[in-house]
Amino acid sequence: MVATSSETTTTEAPTEAEIELGSRLGDAMMGLGRQWAAVSSQLSKFGIDKTSMLLLGALKQIGPVRSNALAEAVYSDPSTISRQVAALVKDGLIERRADPADGRASLLAVTDKGRALLDARHRQRSRSLARMLAHWSLEDRERFVELLERFVVDHERNIPNFIEEHAALMAGSKGEN
């Protein structure tokens, strides 16, 4: 069965062939995760913090929000992001604005300086990735990006299921000791 981004996870048990493809995909994702962690580690030496860029990018995408909504958008806890938010405010990349709905609260918003940084990073990342895939045919590049975009949509939609299934597995394994 070929799933489209509008479909949800099937409740049917996957076949062995599907499980093997899932294994290969998981291994590829883990490898990509390790590679991006290495890039992030090296870039942090130049003042480019992955978490701060993630928060800044999410904030640019969703617009001015309270810090708890920003934390929710990046699947984090508000107390976890407070240090990064404070640093972004200090660096002038985001600002706190009065919440028109509740003057006691504040909204976080990307500043012009923050937008300029994100735009510059986006252009550089786009150039780097374009160079990396330059030896692929145009058809292969377009199809790969199309499928990856589709995967990302489905992946995000299924994050709650993924967390629930793995949390249950871990809870079950701890109960067996």
Image: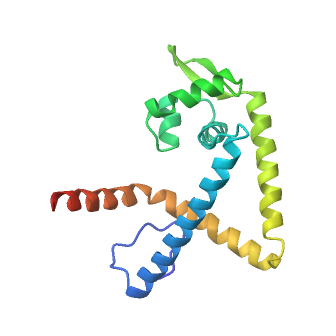
Colouring rule applied to residues: rainbow
User: In the rendered view, does 89 fall on the left or right side of 20?
Assistant: right
**At which x and y percent is residue 121?**
77, 45
User: In the rendered view, does 52 fall on the left or right side of 24?
Assistant: right
**At which x and y percent is residue 144?**
69, 73
Quadrant where the image shows the C terminus: bottom left
Q: How many marks?
A: 0
Image quadrant in which you'd find residue 47: top right
Q: Is residue 89 above or below residue 74?
A: above
Q: Is residue 28 above or below residue 121?
A: below
**At which x and y percent is residue 174?**
21, 57
Residue under the point 56% across and 71% down? 28
Residue under the point 47% across and 39% down? 72
Q: Is residue 173 above or below residue 99?
A: below
**At which x and y percent is residue 132?**
79, 67
Answer yes or no: is residue 5 visible.
no
User: In the rendered view, does 133 fall on the left or right side of 76?
Assistant: right
Residue under the point 33% across and 73% down? 11
The furthest residue to the left: 176
The residue nearer to you, when weighing 156 against 16, is 16
Image quadrant in which you'd find residue 162: bottom left
The residue nearer to you, when weighing 6 against 149, is 149
Answer yes or no: is residue 143 visible.
yes
User: In the rendered view, does 43 fall on the left or right side of 124?
Assistant: left
Residue under the point 81% across and 51% down? 124
